[in-house]
Image (cartoon, rainbow, N blue to C red):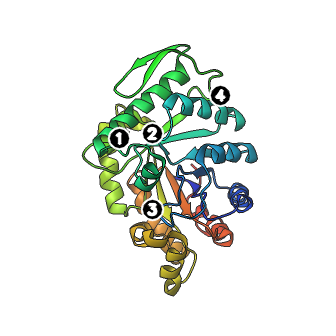
Amino acid sequence: MPRFGVHAGPQMCTMAELRQMWGTAEELGFDWVSVWDHFYPGPFPLDGDCFEAVACHAALAATTSRVKVGSLVYSAGYRHPAVLANAGATIDHLSGGRLEMGLGAGWHQWEYDAYGIPFEPPGTRLRRMAEAVEVIRLLWTEDVADYKGEFFTLKEARCNPKPVQRPPRIWIGASGEQVALKLAGRLGDGWNIPFVSPEDFARKADIVRAAAPDPDRLTIGVNLSYLSVGPDQIDEELSRRFGPGAEFLKPSLLAGSPAEVSDRISRYVEAGADWIILALRAPFDLDGLARFGQEIVPAFPAS
C-alpha cells in the first residue's frame, strides 16, 4: 500500500500560511511534507514571492516532529554539492533523522538567466546532477573524500557531523526517457516525477526500474494535483493555484468522488508508486486536505 504526503510550493504565500499547512498535514496523518527549489514562482508570475528552499527545508525540519521532510528537488546547478551535503546533514539532525534529499538537473531558465547562472544544455545539466549525487553520497559516507569529475573536485574533504541516517535517501527527479530516467534508476535511492498520467507513469517507471542495480531497493513517488471541488470549478481552481501551468497538470488530476479518486490512485499504485504526494499551491485548501485524509487515505490501509 502507498504512503501519502504533501508537496507545497513555498510561493505566493506568507511564512505563517506555509507553516500552518505543514503542521496541518502532519496533524492529519500524512507521512511526508516537502518543499521545492526555486527563487521565482514556478513558472509564473516572475515578480511573485517565493521563499528559498534550504531555509524552508530547515524550518520544516524544525517545526515538525514525525513526517519525512523532503525536497523535490534541489537543482544541481544552484549550489556546490558539498555545500548541499552539509546543509542536508544539518537538516537531518534538526529533524532527528527524517531528511529526504531530492536532486534534479534544473529547468526554470528565468532563474538561471536572472542570477547569471549558466543554463547549460540538457545533457550537461544531467551530467552535473549525476556528479552532485556522487559527491553528496561520498561526503555522507566517507570520513575523508576525494573526487575529481567534470564539474566538481574534492580533496581530503570532510562533512561532519555525518547525517543521523546512514545515509539519508537521495531521490532523483527525472522524466526524460532517453537519459534522465536511466540515471535516476542507476544513481537514485528514490525516483520522483510530477504531473503524469497513470499510463505515462507506468511506462517511465519501467525504464527507471530496468536501469536500477537493485529494483527492489528503489522507492518511487509521484506528485499529483488534487482538488476537492465540483467539476464546474476545476478549471477555475487549477488556474488560480497553478496559473499558466494548469493545463500541464490535468493528466495527473485527482478529482471527483472518493471512489473515483481512490480508483485513480490505485492505477498509480499498480504501476509501482510507493508514495502518493499531493502537490499543493497557495491559497492552501486545508479543508480539502482534511477531506482527502478522512475519505481517501483509509482506502489504502498501511500494510
Q: Secondary structure at mark 2?
A: loop
Q: CA distance from mark 3 to mark 1?
A: 34 Å
Q: Which residue is mark 3?
A: 266
Tell which circle, 3 or 1, labels the residue nearer the N-terminal end: 1
Q: Residue furthest left?
A: 178
- Kind of residue at badge 3: Ser
Q: CA distance from mark 4 to mark 1?
A: 30 Å
Mark before the other along the chain sequence, 4 or 3? 4
Residue 134 falls in image quadrant: top left
Q: Amino acid at mark 1?
A: Arg
Q: Position of residue 123 (x, y in %)?
A: 28, 41
Q: Which residue is mark 4?
A: 164
Looking at the image, residue 178 sits to the left or right of residue 301; the answer is left
| Cα gap from disc 4 to disc 3, whole angstroms | 34 Å
215 displayed left or right of 32? left
Q: CA distance from mark 2 to mark 4?
A: 23 Å
Question: Residue at coordinates 48% horizontally, 48% vertically from top-left?
Answer: 115
Say which of 292 and 287 sits in front. Answer: 287
Q: Which residue is mark 2?
A: 76
Identify the residue position indicated by label 1 in the image.
125
Residue 276 lies, in percent from the top left, at 51, 56
Element type where label 4 sits in the image: loop
Q: Amino acid at mark 2?
A: Ala
- Could you say whether the residue bearing mark 1 is in a helix, strand or loop? helix
Crowd tier of the residue under label 3, counting other residues whose Cα lies within 10 Å: few below 14, some 14–19, many 20 or above = some
Closer to us: 257 or 300: 257
- Say which label, 4 or 1, has the lower sequence index: 1
